[in-house]
Amino acid sequence: MKPAPPDDPGSPTGDWVELAQLIREWGRELGFQQLGFCDTELSEHEAHLESWLTAGLHGEMDYMARHGTRRSRPAELIPGTIRVISVRMDYLPAGVQAAETLLQEPGKALLSRYALGRDYHKVLRKRLQKLATRIEQHAGPFGYRVFVDSAPVLEKALAEKAGLGWIGKHSNLLNREAGSWFFLGEIYTDLPLPVDEPVSEHCGTCTRCIDVCPTGAIIGPYRVDARKCISYLTIELRGSIPEELRPKLGNRIYGCDDCQFVCPWNRYASPSAEPDFQPRHGLDAPQLVALFRWTEAQFLARTEGSAIRRIGYECWLRNIAVALGNAPGSEPVLAALRSRKDHPSELVREHVCWALKQHQAGT
């Protein structure tokens, strides 16, 4: 039976403390490496978000501003929310070639390590729903909503408040024992669970993430200009990639992990044991030319159940064309580009043309 709510949600009764302990245990059983609880007060993070949006650093991600304060005020998004259950799940597959090594092999494609396996939205959402069902079976019906990077939610701010880590200078969440190779998810709830204490930040004077960024997108500690970020350019942007930034993409065709693999805290990251996060279709170290040959039907089939599918086939070819323009000018590379120079998509043709000119300029 659901315990009676206390008069002061900030001072939970023993029943709520016991339930919180059970939720942590259930979370571990479901494959989450860490779980924490926090309240919904995010005024400091709201101010940071408003400043970022006002400066236009979100680029064409209009959805970041579309929901007003509902992103930073959970109870406005889901009325009745007083607590957030925040979880993290490690995703770095074991045994894959390191991203920093692949950067030295320009004939191969580099995809962000989070996208190699099954779409994390599906994996985490299913586990979080199981957790919510388990809570309901034990405590009775309660108000809740599950989120995994698919709604106006300040997931990193909530995870920080819940004690899962601190937001680093690259704007990713960092954990002393796990680095940053993990996904986040949330359950908004009306249960007055005891809250966890945030951890202190441990970036110190380190600026490795800022220094390594290929495009200079990290314009200052904790401030990222999305318009320069390779993850934005290859995933969020639907139009033409700015020409001055194309050479800096190198062989990165989906996302960018540079700021993560130079972070000292990722020395402590553990490989994921989740079968769903293991690489599919050899995408951990594929040849650019081979990927560029994929038909649209092959793209759809081989990205089924993957986060990669969301960019669509045109942007897939756009990104690979840029990478081929940055690759050594071998005959297979040039032949692959010529095969797409009359592609029906103007977007693809433009980037193929640019890539061919890069090789002409290098001869």
Image (cartoon, rainbow, N blue to C red):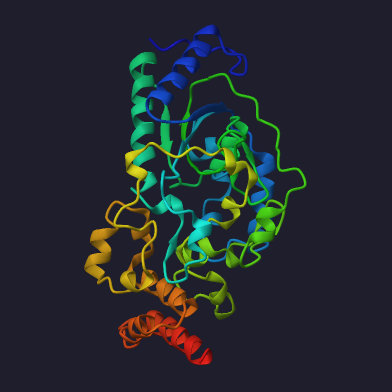
Q: Picture coordinates of residue 299 (x, y %)?
A: 28, 65
Position of residue 62 relative to residue 171, above or below, is below
Q: Picture coordinates of residue 78 (x, y %)?
A: 47, 36
Position of residue 160 relative to residue 327, above or below, is above
In this rendering, would 338 be left or right of 227? left
Residue beneath the point at 41% across and 43% down: 94
Q: Quadrant of residue 317?
A: bottom left
Q: Nearer the viewer, residue 289 or 18?
A: 289
Q: Quadrant of residue 352?
A: bottom left
Q: Residue furthest right?
A: 205
Q: Picture coordinates of residue 319 (x, y %)?
A: 43, 71
Q: Nearer the viewer, residue 216 or 148?
A: 216
Residue beneath the point at 47% across and 85% down: 354
Residue beneath the point at 65% across and 45% down: 168
Position of residue 247 relative to residue 161, above or below, is below
In this rendering, would 9 be left or right of 335? right
Q: How many marks?
A: 0
Q: Picture coordinates of residue 343 (x, y %)?
A: 31, 84
Q: Quadrant of residue 228?
A: bottom right
Examine the rendering and report whether any part of residue 256 can be seen.
Answer: no
